[in-house]
Amino acid sequence: MKRNPVLILVLCVCAVLQGVLHAFSIFPQWERDYSPGKGNVVQQLAPDQIFLSLFGFREFLAGILWVRADGFFDEGNYDAVLPIIRLCTLLDPKQIDVYATGMWHIGYNFTDEEQRSDRRYIPSALALGKEGAKNNPNTYEMFFETGWLWYHKVQDDFPKAVTWFEEAQRRNDIQPARRNLLVWAYQRAGEQQKSLNLLFSLYERAKERFDKNDAEYSNRQNRDTIEGNLDTMLVRMAQRGWFAQNTPEGKAGNWYATGAYDTKPPFDVGFSVKATVVEPKVIKLEGTWNVLPVGTRIKVILKDKDYPRGVPAGMDWDADNAVNLDPPKDITYMQDELYVRNRRFNKKVDMSRDPGMYPFTKQEYVLEFYYNPRIAPPHIQDKFGFDGSGMTDKNFLNTSIRQGERVIYASFPLTRDMIWRRGKWADKVPSIKTANYIETGKTSQTGQDDVLIDVPALRGK
């Protein structure tokens, strides 16, 4: 058989090109996205999906599935979206929109009849954010989205929000307006000096952008907004006593003795509460909060006494690294807010229509009430201070459950029979209350319905 030298040469060139392509493109991508311990994609895909991915159909298939997910969103069929979200992130780990939408969907969309979100899903949402950031380290987006979930939804461990927002700041593609959120995260984490320093830095950056292009409206708006926030921040740090507190004398404990600060004297919030199981899995919560201006929201939590990784008024939200879209169905975690009007709150929490979200399978539960001034609105913080130095309560002030923070905390035990109104509680109404709770038999301190709301100033005359 006669050999064709041209064909042999072509085959040799193809072999060399294949080797170069494998060394500099195919193998690095395989090692980054497919090798065990890296992207972990192959371990979680079916054989037919692996076959498609090897032939370059991975992104194409993920795009088709994500289009299908839009239909489920429109129909409100949220359960059907979860596996599609997971499959899309496995097929295409660079699809940031899927990660971001998936976090929002898992963290916010699963709610009960009263629009309370299912807190059991938050660890999975955070785990999805961590995975998205790991797979997309060169852009700010997943770092910012994960930080936002800590800041807005969890609203508890604010140093975690700071960590993620700081990582987002290190990426050059972050939008100018999104840099500003780290300022408020620093404040909630108790880092007022860092918050102030960042405001100065952001102002210089915004001013420089405006000076280069003063015809761009967004440049002017961003500069003016940051300048206004900076002025307000300086005034509040002075009036709330922060500057005095952080002088050498103030750090020695003498700052509060001198100076007419808005946080003096500490204001007793006068918290009290009564909880009554009026029907099976329906609890009426009544109580007092001696703060007249509106804006107070007291967190109430009902959860298993042995809730996994539970802490007072919360849990260890960041314990999961694996994305688990099907949290345990035998645990209960209810969280809501008690809105105060005219120094009282009165709310009925109905969990009877959502047995999947509130199974109440355990024998013992804990009912918790929690208030942290770090998430209070500014007009409340003007009296309470950044750290609660202007707030007290002779019964329920707590300085131990959150390190370095002054919070209001109270907890009470409940049993399954009390919640279900069974056993000895079938004909007896379960009710618990604090020792300082005063029965009024009225819906407000004035004896009238809470239609009119008094809005005086918190500051002294």
Image: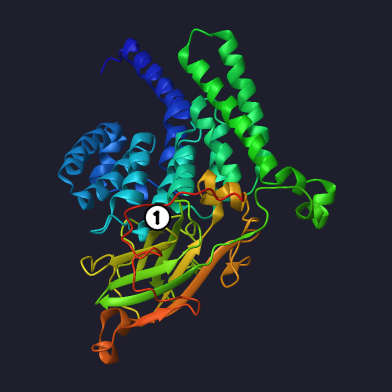
> Which part of the image, by quadrant, shows the N terminus?
top left
Instruction: Residue at 37%, 39% (x, y): give it.
Output: 100
Q: Nearer the viewer, residue 91 or 355?
A: 355
The answer to whether residue 62 shows anywhere in this view is yes
Instruction: Residue at 49%, 27% (x, y): give it.
Output: 177
Instruction: Residue at 31%, 54% (x, y): give it.
Output: 451
Query: Helix, strand or loop at disc 1?
Result: helix
Q: Quadrant of residue 95?
A: top left
Image side of residue 333 versus residue 385, left or right: left
Instruction: Residue at 60%, 50% (x, y): give it.
Output: 383
Tag 1: amino acid: Ile
Image side of residue 202 versus residue 275, left or right: right
Q: Categorize mark 1 by other alpha carbons within 10 Å: few (<14), some (14-19), many (20+).
A: many
Model colouring: rainbow
Q: Nearer the viewer, residue 158 or 320?
A: 158
- Rendered view: 459 above or below 393: above
Which residue is under mark 1?
A: 122
The answer to whether residue 31 shows anywhere in this view is no
Q: Nearer the viewer, residue 56 or 184?
A: 184
Q: Nearer the viewer, residue 328 or 313?
A: 313
